[in-house]
Image (spheres, helix red, strand yellow):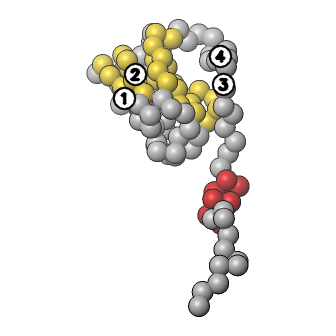
């Protein structure tokens, strides 16, 4: 016979993951963005939990939830602060347009 008296409702894995995950605030209402002042934004797109902007200078900035690498920084870190996607700069590519899906980010670039 099996006993279920000591079964846990919350898996231990979830507890440890929550402890190691940085806090990301969720804005339910419009909020001003803290971008460098010399940036002129030419396009913006929002995914389910992340946002991306393209500047007139062809740079791409992303922030939000990054679990699936959708922020484009080569990791799965999340960020409340807008960060420039350095890979495009390193490759000499200019971002022209960005479209975010639920967990993805698509960028049209100019070589």
Q: Secondary structure at mark 4?
A: loop
- Quarter of image, res 104: top left
Q: Nearer the viewer, mark 1 or mark 4?
A: 4
Cα–Cα span, label 2 and label 1? 6 Å
Residue appearing at x 48%, y 17% in the figure: 44
**Which tag, 3 or 2, sits closer to the chain's start?**
3
Q: Secondary structure at mark 3?
A: loop
Horizontally, residue 87 falls left or right of residue 39, namely left
Q: Residue furthest left?
A: 111
Q: Which residue is mark 3?
A: 28
Residue appearing at x 61%, y 36% in the figure: 79
How many numbered marks appear? 4
Cα–Cα span, label 1 and label 3? 24 Å
The local crowd at label 4, few if under 14, some if 14 to 19, many if 20 or more residues have their Cα within 10 Å, is few
Q: Which residue is mark 1?
A: 106
Q: Say the numbered circle drawn on residue 30.
A: 4
The reply to whether callout 3 and callout 2 are in contact (CB within 8 Å) is no
Q: Nearer the viewer, mark 3 or mark 2?
A: 3
Where is residue 89 shown, x and y percent of the image?
A: 42, 27
Where is residue 95 shown, x and y percent of the image?
A: 38, 20
């Amino acid at each position: 016979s099996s006993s279920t008296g000591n079964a846990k409702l919350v898996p231990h894995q979830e507890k440890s993951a929550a402890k190691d995950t940085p806090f990301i605030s969720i804005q339910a209402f419009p909020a001003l963005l803290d971008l460098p002042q010399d940036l002129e934004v030419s396009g913006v797109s929002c995914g389910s939990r992340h946002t991306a902007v393209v500047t007139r200078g062809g740079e791409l900035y992303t922030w939000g939830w990054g679990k699936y690498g959708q922020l484009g920084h080569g990791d799965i870190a999340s960020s409340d602060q807008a960060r420039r996607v350095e890979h495009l700069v390193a490759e000499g590519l200019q971002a022209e347009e960005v479209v975010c899906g639920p967990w993805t980010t698509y960028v049209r670039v100019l070589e």
